[in-house]
Amino acid sequence: MSDTPTLDDIRAAAERIAPFVHRTPVLTSSSINRITGCEITFKCENFQKGGAFKIRGATNAIRCLSEDQIRYGVATHSSGNHAAAVALAAKMRNTTAYTVMPSNVSRVKKEAVAGYGAKITYCEPTLSARDSVLNDIVRDTGAAFIHPYDNRLVIEGQATTALELLEEVPGLDVVMAPIGGGGLISGTALAVRGLSPRTKVIGVEPEGADDAYRSFRSGTLISAAGPSSIADGLLASLSERTFNILSRHVNDVVTVDDDTITDAMRTIWERMKLVVEPSAAVPFAAILSGRVNITGLKVGIILTGGNVDLNRLPWMNVT
Amino acid sequence: MSDTPTLDDIRAAAERIAPFVHRTPVLTSSSINRITGCEITFKCENFQKGGAFKIRGATNAIRCLSEDQIRYGVATHSSGNHAAAVALAAKMRNTTAYTVMPSNVSRVKKEAVAGYGAKITYCEPTLSARDSVLNDIVRDTGAAFIHPYDNRLVIEGQATTALELLEEVPGLDVVMAPIGGGGLISGTALAVRGLSPRTKVIGVEPEGADDAYRSFRSGTLISAAGPSSIADGLLASLSERTFNILSRHVNDVVTVDDDTITDAMRTIWERMKLVVEPSAAVPFAAILSGRVNITGLKVGIILTGGNVDLNRLPWMNVT
């Protein structure tokens, strides 16, 4: 596929976004290694600008637009971290961000987006309402649409996370990332294939939003119908683009249930003293629950974000 | 005072404990800097072994004992992080730790200490009961008593935190640390005086346990009567030893109330994505509440620990 980013594209993206994003630290924990029986390195994108890796893709996409193309701003739909990332990346390029958010979005996520100065339009929480409102905005304003994941430049940007991880920690046997719409897992797989071909890439999905799992197993793109999970950053379905990259370059896709995600999230908070959101805990949940067999291996996990409502922690409902 | 650790003593302690403790990272946050108007570097002892800086002092003290001196184990009293640190440091030296804890200690802290294999004896939650039970244990077992702060070697160990901070971040105008019994602030002040004499040292205490504040202002050692604060790691009173170091080498002591500590803790969780305990948030609380005037300055803050019961977060009661 000529439209698939190469390692050189990813390296160019890393250089392009470097002035605008953090090179996040990697952390390890001997107690986590003892619990799991493997050697895990966590890439801490919860420390990233905006609290999630999403700023990488948004910045890469927005920096690649010409002055003409961003004259009327940028637009996106997202209920969370991508909206905040586009808002922040637009602000850093002195242009306007229009974001379409479902009317039931949490206060915390709304405030983050509003805090970066984006113009928010609320819509009914359905895909068709979202697309229709977004199309109206693009037509009326002339803003450039930055899709959350079905966008080559966004994928290149997300790929820089794994690029940094592999540069810092050579010799990983496995790299794991969560799957929502597939932007991060696509970028991760492409970076790993380019830099460390023998390293396996495993994507992890919530059971309640397992379209990538079913698509990967069946070899056919299947969309999620009524997805639901506490990992609310992972409810989107793959696009043709991300499905194609996933099919070719990801070694396995597994799923985890919400209780395991909650346990994994809490374990990361307790043992690593890191605030991560439920979506970020999904790959570690697959290890905790034995869904992947990685005993004795060197594993890299992308902790995707740390934006969580501190008044509503999932274990408060289950304990 | 010949019994006061010198910079060379602190450097020797750092070398002695290096194989057994983490060199913790320092982190910064542009949003925290924007909120406060200064340039803050956080020294992340919440990532330390055992979840708090206390392992530094405990390890230094226990490593300095001869084989003969540790033949019958070590003993301490502490309701929290120092007990866990002594337990862990004793385990790393293959000796037994006896810890005296108040009967009302939280499940989380009890489990941490028990998890490192210490023998716990519970006592009534009073100073006299604690001392009497500890004395019995020391008499009956021959264990070496490792005081949480009134111990030169413990102070040397705690001082290595500021040593690392100053090595990594030169040119700090101010270093801030919380005050409980004064072990950390004493070590911090001695390290700063040795390495960077122009840097000011500010200690911060909860209003409900303000013995150091009153002692510092009056020039006389005053013990806390019935101390109470959500910063439960800071309820101890200064000893003669820590009061003397504080009086000579600390530039100022200020206090903060529990609501401000809660706000500061929450802000650190939200903005920095770090799990810190209430005691660790106390210096930042002094900045948030304007108790210190540090606009435009380069400030180092020791985030002392991250051991917190995730089922009982202080803002859950106030929101």
Image (cartoon, coloured by chain):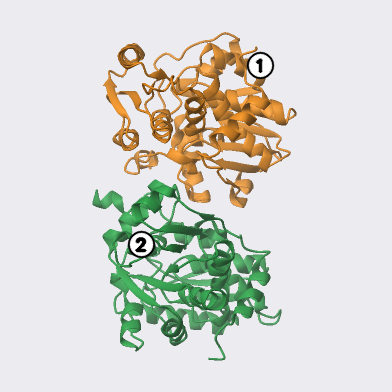
Chain colours: A green, B orange
Q: Residue at x 45, y 45 (%)?
A: B275
Which of the 4 quarters of the picture holds residue A286? bottom left
x 35%, y 44%: residue: B310
Quick one: quadrant of the C terminus of chain B? top left
Residue lying at 47% horizontally and 12% vertically, measured from the top left: B223
In this view, the mark in front (1 or 2)? 2
Q: Chain of mark 1?
A: B
Residue A222 appears left or right of A55: left
The reply to whether dot 1 and dot 2 touch (C-beta < 8 Å) is: no
Horizontal side, residue B250 vs residue B127: left or right: right
Q: Is residue A228 visible?
A: no
> Looking at the picture, do discs 1 and 2 lie on one chain?
no
Determine the secondary structure under disc 1: helix
Count of numbered badges drawn on the protein:
2
Hey, which residue is sitting farthest top in the picture? B220
Task: Estimate the spatial distance between the alpha carbons at disc 1 and disc 2, rounded to whole Å.
Answer: 54 Å
Quarter of the image that includes the N terminus of chain B? top right
Task: Indicate which disc residue B248 carries.
Answer: 1
Position of residue B241 in the picture relative to residue B234 (left or right): right
Task: Give x and y (percent) for residue B10.
Answer: 62, 28
Residue denoted by label 2 = A295
Crowdedness near tag 1: few (<14), some (14–19) or many (≥20) residues, C-alpha within 10 Å? few
Indicate the position of residue B151 as horizontal and vertical percent values. Answer: 51, 18
